Amino acid sequence: MLNLATPEIKFAIDAVQQASALVKQVQAEMVSSALVKNDRSPVTVADFAAQALVGQLLSENFPNDPLVGEEDSAILQTPAQKDTLEKITYFVDRFAEGVAPESVCRWIDRGAAESAPRFWTLDPIDGTKGFLRGNQYAVAFALIVAGKVQIGVLGCPNLKSLSPTGDDHGNGVLVAAARGQGAWVTFLGSEPAFQQLHVSKRTNPAQARLLRSFESAHTNVTNIDRLADALSIEAEPVRMDSQAKYAVLAAGKGEIYLRMLSPSRPNYREKIWDQAAGSLVTEEAGGRVTDLDGKPLDFTAGRTLANNRGVCASNGYLHASALAAIRAIKA
């Protein structure tokens, strides 16, 4: 069981609970069916507001710990973004005290740190298009110490149930993992009542359910199709955005998740906030996470996984088969 008396675990869960509640409010009040497809203003407000809130909470609880986050406030301090900053301040004010535009920018900019022997990393909205569509997205928060993810928490407001009993609380789920303590799920917006997660035990590649994104910008759809053919996969894929896929994999509702290199960006390297929390969740549920060459993810190389190429996550039982297929198709 998670040791909820550990200050870092308690803090991470509370921070993700609050940040998830904040972005749900932004989504409810700013995202409508009339939203123009390329209008990113709601997700921009949610991204910045969630990072500001977590930055503020980190300043209160672990003031000496760096935060490596996706956002910085430079653009918000331009005259053209005055209205956006006011909207962000309005939402953060619901959760924090002493909120002013200047303090919001200061809290956001806590995320400008570089990696250190001990630091936190945050993706305030992982799955931008899922957020805008009202589909899957995640608030992803992790603690990394000496290059190893020690705590990973995912808030998935639109993921209704992962519990072994199939219960649906209606508010989405929170998945938390701590190294050596397993992966656990509870509901957002309620007192934690955790149930443990375990990966599936499927060993036949043909039965593997691939976890696939709607968004294809950071992966190679053609190579994923080729890999599915190489493994003779017959099962229907599970499609969703964001690190929610790691949570689904940890819950045994999928077997393989890949981040192949997009042909348009062959030198792309994953951002650490896109992988840290979810990778630990999957590993603590009994799965395995490596890059496409079978190397462990290296969180010591700055703000990206500079020493890794893509990501291969699985239930563990099918990992060798997945890596063999990746080699076979020369992905």
Image (cartoon, rainbow, N blue to C red):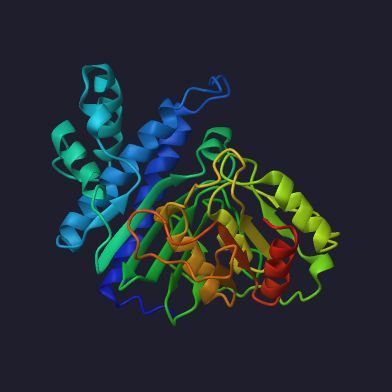
* In the displayed structure image, the side of residue 322 where residue 96 appears, left or right: left
At 75% from the left edge and 57% from the top edge, which residue is drawn? 227
Residue 287 % position (x, y):
59, 74
Query: Taking the image as drawn, is residue 292 in sight?
Result: yes
Residue 36 % position (x, y):
54, 19
* In the displayed structure image, the side of residue 228 where residue 28 appears, left or right: left
Q: Quadrant of residue 8?
A: bottom left
Screen quadrant of the C terminus: bottom right
Question: Count of labels shown?
Answer: 0
Q: Nearer the viewer, residue 249 or 30?
A: 249
Q: Quadrant of residue 258?
A: bottom right
Residue 172 sits above or below residue 208 on the image: above
Query: Taking the image as drawn, is residue 191 in sight?
Result: no
At 15% from the left edge and 60% from the top edge, which residue is drawn? 63
Residue 32 % position (x, y):
53, 25
Screen quadrant of the N terminus: bottom left
Q: Nearer the viewer, residue 81 or 224?
A: 224
Residue 162 sits above or below residue 136 on the image: below
At 52% from the left edge and 38% from the top edge, which residue is drawn? 131
At 30% from the left edge and 53% from the top edge, which residue is drawn? 68
Q: Residue furthest front?
A: 330
Residue 305 % position (x, y):
43, 58
Q: Residue furthest top?
A: 80
Q: Nearer the viewer, residue 290 or 21?
A: 290
